[in-house]
Amino acid sequence: MKKYILPLLLSALAIACTQYGPRVSSGNIEVYYKEGISKVQAERTAQLFREALTASNPNDKATKSFQLSKPGDSILLKMVADKSKLGSIAEEAFYAMSVLVSDSVFGGAPVNLALTDNKFKGFRYFAFKKVTTPAPSWGDKYESGNVELFANDVDSKLAGELAAYLETYFNPSTTFSFQVSKNEQGDFVVKMVIDPSKINNITEADMAEASNGMSEKVFNGSPLQFQLTDESFTPLRTFAYPSDAAPAGNMK
């Protein structure tokens, strides 16, 4: 959802009109809200989407517009969207968006989603449904600051130390996701989720420096594989450490 939905939003509303309700904003996310929705709930929604957009496309500075209302027992989230860019998006992504807002802002209450033009006139609707498909088994989860690490068949103490090291090394302002496991040769494999559009910005020297730090600070000098992956931990690039690449700079 974070990567593929938010860029589909159009720019800000064509007409600033009080009929849309009061407005709150967080960065380039604006949320209008009507009776039944509190200012705090609107602010939390704006913050939620700002964090999602920052994580997926930090260079997108165009204003994105939403509206929250409560016409009955459920919440209605309206999202200004571009019809021409919707064809490649699976419906489940929109349902996942409504569940995210439901869980993060409204304590699990139903949130229906409407895609609209830039006057909040709806053209497509998604009735709230709780996603019941179990999440992929990525391993036990460890957290340190904004780092989340999933560990498969790796000692819990070691996994905790790795999460703490990655948090110190990257010092991320948004959530960074990793996975650690072992391959058939018994070497550690550390995976890092990255925006595929930015993968060529990471040099071999960057990967060598990060791999060296993990090996020396966490794995007692053991060899490892460092992989850049998509959001499902499918590898996009693999770096084997040690190698002949000389560390220079870092990946922050």
Image: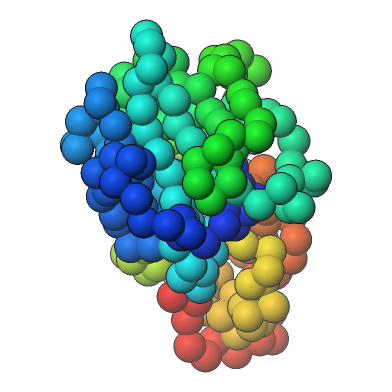
Residue 16, how many percent across, how many down?
Answer: 36, 56
Residue 147, how many percent across, how many down?
Answer: 39, 51
Q: Residue furthest right?
A: 87
Colour option used: rainbow
Can residue 111 be seen here?
Answer: yes
| Depth order, front residue of 237/53 | 53
Q: Residue furthest top?
A: 73
Task: State which quadrant residue 37 falls in.
Answer: top left
Q: Residue at x 65, y 34 (%)?
A: 123
Residue 152, how many percent across, how many down?
Answer: 58, 36
Q: Residue at x 67, y 56 (%)?
A: 229
| Depth order, front residue of 144/158 | 144
Residue 153, how many percent across, how many down?
Answer: 58, 34
In which quadrant is the N terminus drawn? top right
The answer to whether residue 174 is left or right of residue 124 is left
The answer to whether residue 132 is left or right of residue 172 is right
The answer to whether residue 179 is left or right of residue 14 is right
Q: Residue at x 29, y 40 (%)?
A: 21
